[in-house]
Image (cartoon, grey):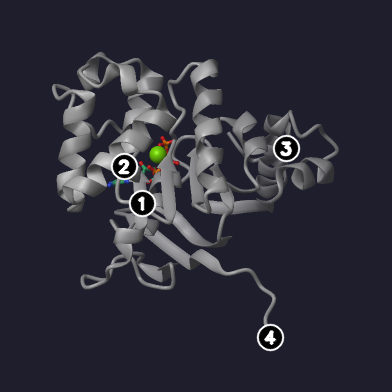
C-alpha cells in the first residue's frame, strides 16, 4: 500500500509559451491535501501562468496538469467547481458594494438562497467585512479589497484555493491578517497555492517552489532550503539569490 500523501495538484513537465516568450519551461510540482504551497519568484517568473494552468484557464503546450485527479482545462470537467481562484488583477465590480459583489458571485456559482445566506455570514465573519457590506468595492482599502476577492472565491466552498499575489500592495498589518485567515482555511482542510514576489512570505508556506525565468530552480520546506544555504529562514531573499546565482552560474542580471 502506498503511503504517499494524496496529491490535489500536479504539474508534470509543463511547458507554456506566449509567442517567443517561454513562460514555463518544463515545470513539475505536486501539492498534497492540506498543504500551503508557495510559488515564489520575481516579476515575469511564470507564477500567473502556472496558476492559470492550475485553474484550467490555460492549456499547457506540453506536459500534464491534474487538479483533484482531473484535467482542469477539459471542456466537460466539473473539477473547476472544486477550485477557487483569487486572480492577481482586480476582478471585482468596483461600483458594486461588498454585498452586491458577494451576491453576484453567488449567482455565478449557482448557490441556493439558503446556502448563500449561511455562506455570506460565515465569510463576512472570517474576513471581518461585516461592517462594510454597503461600501463600494472601489472604496475599500487594499487589504479589504483582497479579503473581499477571497470571500467571493470561497463562496462555493472550494477544496483547492489558488491565490495569485494575494498580499501584493497590502500593508504589513493586513498582510498578517490575510495570512491568519488563510491558515483558518487550511485548518478546515483546504489546499492552498499562493504566489508571491515577497521572499519573506516563503516562511509562511509549508513548502515553496522557487520560480525563476520559467523554471522551478528549487523546491522544499523554507527552513530546509535556508539551512542548505547557511542563512536564516527569515532571510529568504538571501536563499533565493544564492539559488539564482547557482542556477545561472553568476550570469543573472
Ligand atoms: N497572455 C500573454 N501574452 C504574452 N506574454 C505573456 C502572457 N502571459 C504571460 N506572458 C509572459 O510570460 C512570462 C511569464 O509571465 P507571468 O505573468 O506568468 O509571470 P509572473 O511571475 O506572474 O509575473 P508578475 O510577478 O509580474 O505577475 C512573462 O515574460 C510575461 O510577459
Ligand atoms: Mg503574475
Label 2 Cα neighbours within 10 Å, binned few <14 / some 14-19 / many ≥20: many
Q: Name the residue under label 1.
A: 157
Q: Name the residue under label 3.
A: 239
Would you say residue 219 is visible in this rendering?
Answer: yes
Q: Disc 3 vs disc 4: which is toward the camera?
A: 4
Upstream in sequence: badge 3 or badge 1: 1
Distance, label 2 to label 3, CA atoms, is 41 Å
* Residues at discs 3 and 4 in contact (Cβ within 8 Å): no
Upstream in sequence: badge 4 or badge 1: 4
Upstream in sequence: badge 2 or badge 4: 4
Upstream in sequence: badge 3 or badge 4: 4
Q: Disc 4 vs disc 1: which is toward the camera?
A: 1
**In the picture shown, does residue 204 fall above or below 24?**
above
Q: Name the residue under label 4.
A: 1
Looking at the rendered image, the quarter that the N terminus falls into is bottom right
Q: Label 4 CB, ligand 1: below 8 Å? A: no
The residue lying at 54 percent from left, 53 percent from top is 215
Numbered disc 2: secondary structure: helix
The residue lying at 82 percent from left, 46 percent from top is 228
- In which quadrant of this rendering is ligand 2 seen? top left
Distance, label 4 to label 1, CA atoms, is 31 Å
**In the picture shown, does residue 198 fall above or below 40?**
above
Label 4 Cα neighbours within 10 Å, binned few <14 / some 14-19 / many ≥20: few
Amino acid at each position: 500500500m502506498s503511503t504517499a500523501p494524496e496529491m490535489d495538484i500536479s504539474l508534470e513537465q509543463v511547458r507554456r509559451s506566449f509567442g517567443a516568450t517561454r513562460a514555463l519551461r518544463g515545470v513539475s510540482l505536486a501539492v498534497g491535501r492540506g498543504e500551503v504551497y508557495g510559488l515564489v519568484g520575481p516579476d515575469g517568473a511564470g507564477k500567473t501562468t502556472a496558476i492559470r494552468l492550475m485553474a484550467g484557464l490555460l492549456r499547457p503546450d506540453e506536459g500534464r496538469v491534474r487538479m483533484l485527479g482531473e484535467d482542469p482545462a477539459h471542456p466537460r470537467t466539473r473539477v473547476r467547481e472544486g477550485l477557487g481562484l483569487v486572480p492577481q488583477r482586480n476582478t471585482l465590480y468596483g461600483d458594486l458594494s461588498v454585498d452586491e459583489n458577494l451576491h453576484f458571485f453567488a449567482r455565478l456559482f449557482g448557490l441556493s438562497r439558503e446556502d448563500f445566506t449561511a455562506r455570506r455570514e460565515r465569510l463576512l465573519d472570517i474576513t471581518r467585512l461585516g461592517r462594510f457590506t454597503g461600501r463600494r468595492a472601489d472604496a475599500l482599502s487594499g487589504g479589504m479589497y483582497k479579503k473581499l476577492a477571497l470571500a467571493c472565491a470561497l463562496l462555493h466552498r472550494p477544496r483547492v484555493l489558488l491565490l495569485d499575489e494575494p498580499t501584493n500592495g497590502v500593508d504589513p498589518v493586513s498582510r498578517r491578517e490575510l495570512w491568519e485567515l488563510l491558515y483558518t482555511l487550511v485548518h478546515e482542510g483546504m489546499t492552498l497555492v499562493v504566489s508571491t514576489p515577497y521572499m519573506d512570505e516563503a516562511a509562511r508556506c509549508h513548502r515553496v517552489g522557487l520560480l525563476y525565468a520559467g523554471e522551478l530552480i528549487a523546491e522544499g520546506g523554507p527552513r530546509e532550503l535556508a539551512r542548505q544555504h547557511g542563512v536564516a529562514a527569515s532571510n529568504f531573499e538571501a536563499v533565493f539569490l544564492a539559488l539564482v546565482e547557482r542556477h545561472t552560474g553568476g550570469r543573472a542580471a
